[in-house]
Amino acid sequence: MKTSIKRGLGFGITSGVITTLGLIIGLYSSTNSKITIIGGIIIIAVADSLSDAFGIHISEEYASKNKEKDIWRATFSTLFFKFIFAITFIIPFLFFKLSLAIIINIIWGLVLISIFSYYTAKKHKTSVKKAVLEHLVISIVVIVLTYFIGMFIGKVFA
């Protein structure tokens, strides 16, 4: 796999998981509405994927000496992977009650982060345990913060 595609995959997985989980948890704790959460996931899968792909494109143009072809590969792979990983979070909402779908999505997100962290640590010959733990802690902090932010929003603006 080309480096530019790996860059898009890495960014797409991490951003897709963390952003979507944060959105889901925040919307759940503020609205408790399945349709609002599903709508939010679709919107974030489209808008944030396009935004992140554009950000990667600009960043690659500015910071790297890559060929234009590699810049576009990184752009489109970011768009593709971010969209795909974000949209997978809809599936539990289609088959389960809201509270169970939330738990399944948290587990799904943490598993994805763990797998990618493992792969990255192995590739760079660094501590797998440290990489996985570090990335899981960051993910859990996002989940907890967005839960309380959602609770605050639900109380203040509802």
Image (cartoon, grey):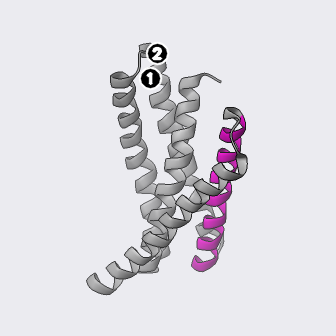
- Give coordinates of residue 7: x percent, y percent: 53, 32
Tell me which amino acid carries mark 2.
Lys
* Residue located beneath label 2 in the image: 69
Q: Percent position (x, y) of residue 95?
A: 66, 70
Secondary structure, mark 2, is helix
What separation in Å lies between label 2 and label 1 (alpha carbons)?
5 Å
Looking at the image, residue 157 lies above or below residue 15: below
Image location (x, y in percent) of residue 149: 38, 74
Residue 62 in which image quadrant = top left
Q: Return the mark for residue 51.
A: none
Decide if residue 131 is in sight here: yes
Q: Is residue 137 left or right of residue 44?
A: right
> Is residue 38 in view?
no
User: Is 113 included in the stretch rendered in magenta?
Assistant: yes
- Locate residue 97, reporting x and y percent: 62, 78
- CB atoms at circles 2 and 1 under 8 Å apart? yes
Residue of label 1: 72
